[in-house]
Image (cartoon, grey):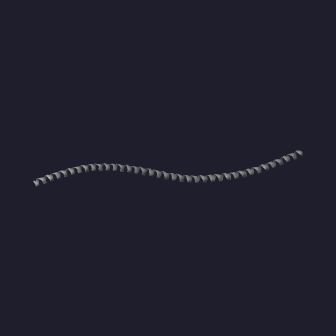
Amino acid sequence: DNSIQQLQNELNEAKEKQKALKSEAKTLEEEMKDMDAARDKMVQKAKETLKKAKVELAKVQKRASEAQEAEDLAKLEIDQLLTEQETLEKDIETSTQALSENHGEMAALEEKLNTQTQSYQNANSKLEEKRNE
């Protein structure tokens, strides 16, 4: 009788422990579901953040590319202007040299004209003298 009662008590204790374990298992299962849901939510937020970051990165890369193109174009324009300036400087030098040569020729022609004018005046004076004789 006593051993049956003891077995009955052990059985009841085992049933209580089993019930407590089932309850604990159910609680853990619910906590796991909550953690899974929270994890899924965090993963979704991370995906959205990553997507936004990719869009922003694409915008920044596009602006950087446009800035690089503008810089390249500006460098090309500067190179063209420098080449043009160099050409103009050479043209000015050539023109200045030609002008200097023209001044020299003009001075020589002026000298020649003065000499011829003097010769003409001398000849004219001699002619006057002969007419007067």
Percent coordinates x, y for residue 121 in the rendering: 17, 52
Q: Where is residue 45 in the image (x, y as percent from the top left)?
A: 63, 53
* Residue 110 locus on image (x, y percent): 23, 51
User: Is 79 left, or right, of 117 in this rendering?
Assistant: right
For the image shown, how many numbered marks are present on the structure?
A: 0
Residue positioned 47% across, 51% down in the render: 71
Q: Which residue lies furthest to the top in this view?
A: 3
Q: Nearer the viewer, residue 47 or 73?
A: 73
Left or right: where does residue 6 sit relative to residue 52? right
Could you say which is closer to the camera, residue 123 or residue 92? 123
Query: What percent of the width, then of the height, locates residue 107?
Result: 25, 50
Furthest residue toward right: 1
Closer to us: 4 or 127: 127
> What residue do we see at 58% from left, 54% from top?
52
Say which residue appears at 49% left-offset and 52% top-offset. 67
Asked if residue 114 lies left or right of residue 41, the reply is left
Picture residue at 67% right of the left edge, 52% below the top: 38
Q: Please name whichever residue, 60 or 110, is drawn nearer the observer in this view of the structure.
A: 110
Q: Is residue 1 left or right of residue 110?
A: right
In the displayed image of the protein, which residue is found farthest to the front?
133
